[in-house]
Image: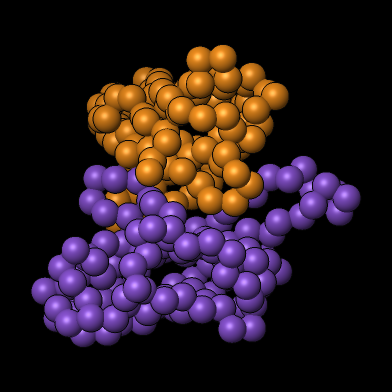
């Protein structure tokens, strides 16, 4: 399977605990994104990486959240001191961004993983 | 903030019928994308339409884009039970992050 994978698929934790999620993007993709989705809503952007550089963080990403992509391959999203409001589906996506000189059209088709569903009790 | 808004919120149709849903957005875009999400699963990319395109087809899917009205529509023809899912439009105004609407939930009855 060469798609985006996420681990774990489900996580149940108690309030105050730390959790870490992992995302493995499609291997040749240079961009990696994290989104959060709550019930009945569309995904909301959290952060993204171009290779190993984290280029933007949403205001939704409080100080308790940290994301890394140490070697420009897989990424981890850690939530410290979880709160019940953190309960959501955390989605990872990846894309291969090519500039126009490289034959790309400047578009960014993102491929999503299956998500990690977090429940904070 | 979420830029796109889908309409209707929910749609129930008989197998074989067509399903149409609309998306409105607020700011200028480079492209607009439609995604499908089966219950509790990840999103599957369906189709991308660029800002200079007006209509695009992919199998049983037809997407239109009207940049003057800042709106798009997704038509699924000859629906099947497997089309039961939530459908989201997403705009890409600044070259990286996608901004999604709340989605349209489509139920296809056998």
Identify the residue at image location x=55%, y=56%. Answer: A111
Quarter of the image where the C terminus of chain A is located: bottom left
Q: Camera-side residue: A92 or A53?
A: A53
The x and y percentages for residue A38 are: 26, 54
Compared with residue A42, is residue A19 higher up or lower down, i.e. above or below? Answer: below
Looking at the image, the residue that sits furthest to the top is B68
Q: Is residue B55 left or right of residue B13?
A: right
Q: Is residue A119 above or below residue B40?
A: below
Q: Nearer the viewer, residue B53 or B110?
A: B53
State the residue lying farthest toward the left. Answer: A121
Q: Taking B48 as reference, is A94 above or below it?
A: below
Horizontal side of A81 relative to A51 (left or right) equals left
Q: Which of the 4 quarters of the picture holds residue A72? A: bottom right
Q: Colour of chain B?
A: orange
Give the letter of the purple chain. Answer: A
Query: Looking at the picture, how far across and down is residue B16, in whole percent?
Result: 38, 23
Residue drawn at x 59%, y 64% is A55
Q: Give the side of residue B73 with respect to residue B82, left or right.
A: right
Residue A2 makes an appearance in the image: no
Q: Position of residue B58 (x, y in %)?
A: 61, 32
Quadrant in the picture for the N terminus of chain A: bottom right
């Amino acid at each position: 399977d060469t798609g985006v994978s996420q681990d774990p698929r489900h996580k149940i934790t108690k309030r105050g605990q730390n959790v870490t999620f992992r995302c493995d993007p499609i291997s040749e993709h240079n961009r990696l994104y994290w989104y959060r989705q709550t019930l009945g809503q569309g995904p909301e952007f959290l952060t993204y990486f171009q290779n190993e550089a984290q280029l933007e963080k949403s205001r939704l990403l409080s100080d308790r959240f940290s994301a890394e992509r140490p070697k420009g391959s897989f990424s981890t999203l850690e939530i410290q001191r979880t709160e019940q409001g953190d309960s959501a589906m955390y989605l990872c996506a990846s894309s291969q961004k090519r500039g126009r000189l490289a034959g790309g059209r400047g578009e960014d088709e993102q491929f999503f993983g299956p998500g990690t569903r977090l429940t904070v009790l | 903030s979420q830029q796109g808004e889908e309409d209707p919120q929910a749609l129930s149709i008989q197998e074989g019928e067509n399903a149409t849903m609309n998306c409105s957005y607020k700011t200028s875009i480079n492209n607009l994308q439609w995604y499908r999400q089966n219950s509790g699963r990840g999103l599957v990319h369906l189709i991308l339409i660029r800002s200079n395109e007006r209509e695009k087809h992919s199998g049983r899917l037809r997407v239109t884009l009207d940049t003057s009205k800042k709106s798009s529509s997704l038509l699924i023809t000859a629906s099947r039970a497997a089309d039961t899912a939530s459908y989201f439009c997403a705009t890409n105004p600044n070259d990286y992050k996608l901004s999604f609407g709340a989605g349209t939930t489509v139920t296809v009855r056998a």
